[in-house]
Image: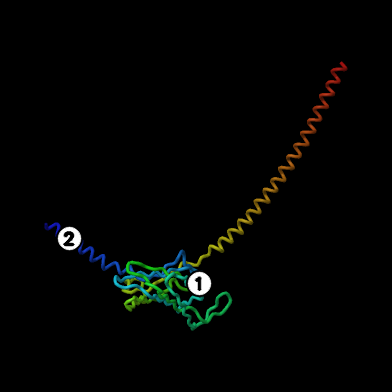
Amino acid sequence: MKASRIAAATVAAGSAVLALSVPAFAHVTVQPEGTAAKGGYAVVDVKVPNERDDASTTKVEISLPTDHPIASVMPQPVPGWKATVTKSKLDKPMTMHGEKIDEAVSKVTWTADGKGIEPGFFQKFPLSLGALPENTDQLVFKALQTYSDKEVVRWIEVPQEGQDEPENPAPVLKLAAADEDEHGSASAADATDKTGKTENTAAADSGDGSDTTARVLGVAGIVIGIAGVAYGVFAGRRRTAA
């Protein structure tokens, strides 16, 4: 009896701990599809889970970092949602493809046309971003999540290295090192081409040498054959004369 009570208490305690720890993982995040490399372009998913049992998420707002502005931001259409892009003037214009840009996207808002994100579900909102900055290792995207009961959850607390995760952490996108594969591939291709040409030239030279040797041997064989026939005729005549 006592053992069963202890077991029941343990299960209850475990369930309570699990219930408290689940929300810590159920927050808005920004995750790349593949690699988000410095200086490159990437598609990222704004992943929004519904944390409520009695309300749906009807609006999501993502603020893009103003300290590291991104010139090109394009949302992918999501069925059941309307996307609105807001641009703002930059304090310091930036250059992209040789052109100066004095404004950039500062916020993207998705508003549900229907039920939104219902309890027990999540939704991904894809964004195409570029060119990603080269002078930082991460980008912080502060987010606001609005529910059908008008509650607004502010995911704006910036996580700090070496500290516990805040209660409402802002989504963070980690940036990988600049991708130099294209340059490396080009160099490798050039090297391969050069090597290939050298090998082909050597093969051609080798082929020419082989052809010459074959011709010499062929002529020598003909000469030897003629000499053998002549010797045979001469020897036959000598036997006949004798």
* Amino acid type, residue under disc 1 in the picture: Gly
- Residue behind mark 2: 8
Q: Position of residue 33 (x, y in %)?
A: 45, 65
Left or right of residue 5: residue 233: right
How far across and how far down the image is residue 118, in percent?
34, 70
The amino acid pointed to by label 2 is Ala
**Is residue 15 at least partly visible in the picture?**
yes
Q: In the displayed image of the protein, which residue is found farthest to the top?
A: 242
Give the SS element for disc 2: helix
Q: Residues within 10 Å of mark 1 (few under 14, many from 20)?
A: many
> Looking at the image, which is closer to me, 146 or 186?
146
- Left or right: residue 16 versus residue 87 is left
The image quadrant where one finds the C terminus is top right
- Marks 2 and 1, Cα distance to the nearest angstrom? 54 Å
Q: At 48% from the left edge and 71% from the top edge, which residue is drawn? A: 129
Residue at 51 percent across and 70 percent down: it is 39
**Secondary structure beneath label 1:** strand
- Disc number lying in front (2 or 1): 2
Which disc is residue 231 wearing?
Answer: none
Residue 225 in the image: above or below residue 180: above
Label of residue 130 in the image: 1
> Between 67 and 20, which is closer to the camera in this rendering?
20
Q: Work out which residue is located at the far front of the displayed protein and give it.
A: 114
> Looking at the image, is 55 positioned above or below residue 216?
below
